[in-house]
Every structure is written in structure tokens, then in C-alpha cells.
């Protein structure tokens, strides 16, 4: 059985992420999504919330599991028995950065390969940071994330007072 690990922050999960997850689930026997607990970032959602959101968003994909992790992606992959790291690329410009990470990971764990999947064209401009920014200004994010994620973002922004004043 070939296990792939797909690590990321997923704050929030977007249609682009879900596109990569669905396609990876067709390529590998099992895909373990790793939600990174990153102390250097201030995420909109807690790790538990992101795990729960991703679990809900992928509930119809039987060979996907969602867990949290802390540390290096290759260590996460080793912990879950993955031989492949999945990385999503939106634009060609992502490749330079991601290839540096892949080469570093290969040096750290030569037994783990990296697979790059370009997101489908209709999601190539969507990023979590853009979704958060549009939502902060009360913009329509329905084309970027599932409806229940859009609602969770709106509730979180409303509850945090992060919404910008229009005056």
C-alpha cells in the first residue's frame, strides 16, 4: 500500500487544496493530510478547528485521513509511513520555492519522494491568504472555499473583531 502525506497549514482549506487532495487520493492508496502546528504563524483557525474542517471537507474521500503534526514534513511522512510527499503548485513561480524544499527533504530523508501536482486552472490564483483577506473585507469567498468553510470564516472574523472598519 502506497501512503502519501500532504502537509500544510490549510488556514483555511480552499478548493485548490481539495483539488490536490482528490487527485492525490486517485494516485495513492492512502493520503494522510497533515495540518501543521506552526508556532511562527498566527492562524485564523486553531489546529483542532483546521483538522475538523478538513475532515468534514474530505469526508466523501474514503482513503483520506486528517491529523495534526509539528515539525518537519519528512518527519511527519515517516511517522505515518508515507513514501511520498504531495505538494500542490498553483503557478510556475511556486516551483522554485517548492523544489528547494523537495531537495532539502530528499537530503534529510532519501527514501521519501516528492510529487508535485499543479492545481486545476480554475484554482490557480486561490490561496488561503487571499481568502482570508477577501473575507476580512466582507468580500464573497464562495468561489474559493466550500460553503461551510465560508461560514466558519465569517463567524471567526466576526468573533475576532478582525473585520476592517469602512469608515
Image (cartoon, grey):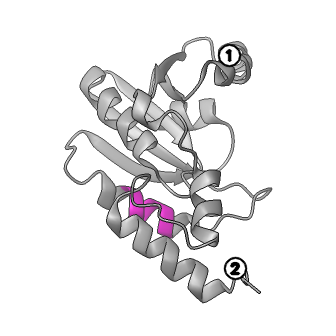
Determine if residue 16 is in view: yes
Single out the residue that lies furthest toward the right.
40
Report the residue at 71% width, 19% height from top: 108
Between 163 and 103, the residue placed more toward the observer is: 163
Residue with the mark numbered 1:
99
Image quarter of residue 110? top right
Q: Crowding near pointer 2: few (<14 within 10 Å), some, many (20+)?
A: few
> Circle 1 sits in a helix, a strand or a loop, which is it?
helix
Picture coordinates of residue 74 (x, y %)?
A: 61, 29
Q: Earlier in the sequence, mark 2 or mark 1?
A: 1
**Image quadrant in which the C terminus is located:** bottom right
Q: Which residues are magenta?
A: 49-54
Image quarter of residue 152? bottom left
Residue 162's disc number: 2
**Image quadrant in which the N terminus is located:** top left
Compared across the picture, whether 21 is left or right of 163 comes to left
> Circle 2 sits in a helix, a strand or a loop, which is it?
loop
Between 131 and 80, the residue placed more toward the observer is: 131
Report the residue at 53% width, 30% height from top: 78
In three-dimensional space, the C-alpha distance between marks 2 and 1, rounded to whole angstroms, equals 35 Å
In the depicted structure, whether residue 133 falls above or below residue 29: below
Compared across the picture, whether 41 is left or right of 147 comes to right
Residue 68 covered by magenta stretch: no
Amino acid at each position: 500500500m502506497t501512503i502519501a502525506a500532504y502537509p500544510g497549514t490549510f488556514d483555511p482549506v480552499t478548493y485548490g487544496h481539495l483539488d490536490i487532495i482528490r487527485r492525490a487520493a486517485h494516485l495513492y492508496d492512502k493520503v494522510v493530510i497533515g495540518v501543521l502546528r506552526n508556532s511562527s504563524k498566527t492562524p485564523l483557525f486553531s489546529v483542532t478547528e483546521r483538522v475538523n474542517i478538513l475532515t468534514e471537507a474530505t469526508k466523501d474521500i474514503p482513503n483520506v485521513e486528517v491529523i495534526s503534526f509539528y515539525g518537519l514534513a519528512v518527519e511527519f511522512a515517516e511517522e505515518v509511513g508515507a513514501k511520498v510527499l504531495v505538494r500542490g503548485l498553483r503557478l510556475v513561480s511556486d516551483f522554485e520555492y517548492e523544489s528547494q524544499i523537495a531537495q532539502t527533504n530528499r537530503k534529510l530523508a532519501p527514501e521519501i519522494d516528492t510529487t508535485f501536482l499543479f492545481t486545476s486552472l480554475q484554482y490557480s490564483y486561490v490561496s488561503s491568504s487571499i481568502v482570508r483577506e477577501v473575507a476580512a473585507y466582507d468580500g464573497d469567498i464562495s468561489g474559493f472555499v466550500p460553503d461551510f468553510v465560508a461560514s466558519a470564516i465569517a463567524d471567526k472574523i466576526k468573533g475576532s473583531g478582525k473585520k476592517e472598519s469602512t469608515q
